[in-house]
Amino acid sequence: REQMSNRVGRPIRASDRVLEGHENVAWSVDWSRSGKFIVSGSEDGTARVWQASSGALVSVLRGHTVFVLSACFSPDDRIIATASSDGTARLWNRESGEQ
């Protein structure tokens, strides 16, 4: 896996692809255990799930009212946990994108 960066102004790359779609800074990135997916959390209030092999956007997780500071996969890759500066943590079904 290529090393990824989430510092301000630095692109997030997977397989030499830039994952574009967030409307603001991405603060958190996690690879699924299987290596098939990437999740990113952003100041735009969303988390986004990407297909690691192609960089294609799989889903946009909306529900936080402000910055998503952290996003990660459960050990079995079925659930995504996000934490926000709105004071909430949310659990999402990776396949459906629903809470």
Image (cartoon, helix red, strand yellow):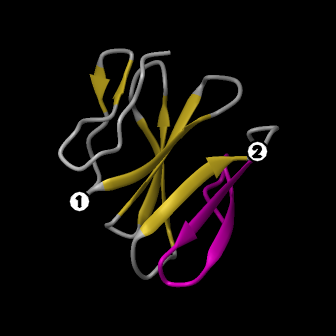
Residue positioned 51% across, 73% down in the render = 84
Residue positioned 70% across, 24% down in the render = 34
User: In this view, which residue lies farthest toward the right?
Assistant: 76
Residue 11: x %, y % from top left: 24, 36
> What distance separates the C-alpha of mark 1 from that of mark 2?
26 Å
Residue 59: x %, y % from top left: 49, 50
Q: Which of the two labelled residues, at mark 1 and mark 2, occupies the earlier sequence position?
A: 1
Q: Nearer the viewer, residue 48 or 87?
A: 87
Asked whether residue 39 is in view, the answer is yes
Mark sitting on residue 63: none
Residue 46, compared with residue 17, is above or below; it is: below
The reply to whether callout 1 and callout 2 are in contact (CB within 8 Å) is no
Q: Nearer the viewer, residue 28 or 51?
A: 28
Residue 72: x %, y % from top left: 62, 49
Label 2: element kind: loop
Residue positioned 32% across, 67% down in the render = 44
Mark sitting on residue 78: 2
Residue type at numbered disc 1: Glu
Asked whether residue 99 is in view, the answer is no
Q: Quadrant of the C terminus?
A: bottom right
Residue 83, by quadrant, is bottom right
Q: Nearer the viewer, residue 26 or 17?
A: 26
Are there few (<14), some (14-19), or many (20+) residues within 10 Å of tag 2?
few
Residue type at numbered disc 2: Arg
Residue positioned 39% across, 70% down in the render = 45
Label 1: element kind: loop
Q: Magenta segment: does it hold 56?
A: no
Residue 80: x %, y % from top left: 66, 53
Residue that numbered label 1 is attached to: 23
Q: Which residues are magenta?
A: 79-99
